[in-house]
Image (cartoon, rainbow, N blue to C red):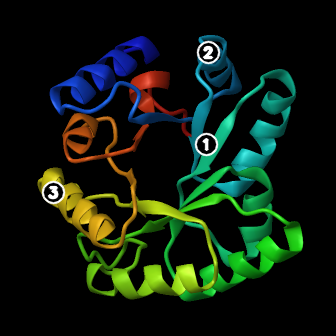
Amino acid sequence: MTLRDITDRIAKAENNAGRAAGAVSLIAVSKVQPDARVQAVLDEGHRIFGENKVQEAAGKWPDFRSQYDGIELHLIGPLQTNKARQAMELADYIHTLDRPKLANIIARLAQEIGRCPELFIQVNTGEEDQKAGVMPADADGFIAECRALDLPVRGLMCIPPVDEEASLHFALLAKIAARNGLEGLSMGMSSDFEKAIALGATHVRVGSAIFGERVPT
C-alpha cells in the first residue's frame, strides 16, 4: 500500500458518497515511524501528519518544518495537562480534548500564548472504561462548556471499539456533531476509513497503510 493508493481510495469514497472532491483530509499518522519514512512521504508532497505523543512530535517536527513548507500537525493521542502548553505551541490541531480541566487549561494558555490550535472533542462512543473521551450523554454539555470558554471547537473525534461495527459509532458521532452545529468529524482509520467517509468524516487517520508497520521502541 502506498500514499497514492490511500488518496485514490479516499477520492473514490468521496465520489461514492456524493461528496465534493477534497472534502476529506488525510492525516498520515507518523507516530513511531523512522524519520526516513516520514521524509519520503513529505517528498511525495503530503503535508498533513498526526502524532500521538507530544514528546515525539517535539523531537521530529521542528526540524521537518525547517525543511518543508505548509506542514499541518495534528495531535491525536491522549493529552496530559502538563503537556498542554507544548502541545499548543507545536500543533495546528488537537483531536483529544476530553475533560473540563484540560479545556480550562487550554483556554488559559491560549490567552497567554496568543493562539490556540483548532480543537476536536473526543467522544467515547463505545463507553469503554479504558478509553479516553467524554461519554455520549455528556457531549452536548461539554461542547457548550468549551464554547463558553471561547475555545475553537472544530468538531468531534472517536475511536470505535475494535469488536463492534465501526459504522454505528461513526453515525453516532455524526449525529452529536450535527445537533451541535459542528462540521468536523475526525473518524476512520486504515481498516474503516471508507465507511467513515460515507458517514461524513472530514479527517481520516491512516498510519501503517502509508508508512508500513510501526517500528517498536
Residue 42: x percent and y percent? 65, 19
Mark closer to the chain start, 1 or 2 = 2
Query: Element under label 3?
Result: loop
Type of amino acid under label 2: Gly
Which class describes the residues within 10 Å of circle 2: few (<14), some (14-19), or many (20+)?
Answer: few
Type of amino acid under label 1: Thr
Please identify, in this view, whether the residue under mark 2 or under mark 3 is nearer the observer.
Answer: 2
- Residue positioned 51% across, 87% down in the render: 145
Mark closer to the chain start, 2 or 3 = 2
- Residue positioned 70% across, 75% down in the render: 106
Which class describes the residues within 10 Å of circle 3: few (<14), some (14-19), or many (20+)?
Answer: few
Residue under label 2: 45
Q: Is residue 147 above or below residue 176?
A: below
Q: Is residue 188 above or below residue 42?
A: below
Structural distance between the alpha carbons of marks 1 and 3: 27 Å
Residue under label 3: 163
Structural distance between the alpha carbons of marks 2 and 3: 35 Å
| Side of 12 where 101 appears, left or right | right
Please identify, in this view, whether the residue under mark 1 or under mark 3 is nearer the observer.
Answer: 3
Q: Quadrant of residue 111?
A: bottom right
Which class describes the residues within 10 Å of circle 1: few (<14), some (14-19), or many (20+)?
Answer: few
Q: Are marks 2 and 3 in contact (CB under 8 Å)?
A: no
Residue under label 1: 217
Structural distance between the alpha carbons of marks 1 and 2: 27 Å
Type of amino acid under label 3: Asp
Please identify, in this view, whether the residue under mark 1 or under mark 2 is nearer the observer.
Answer: 2
Query: Element under label 2?
Result: loop
Mark closer to the chain start, 1 or 3 = 3
Residue 137: x percent and y percent? 27, 85
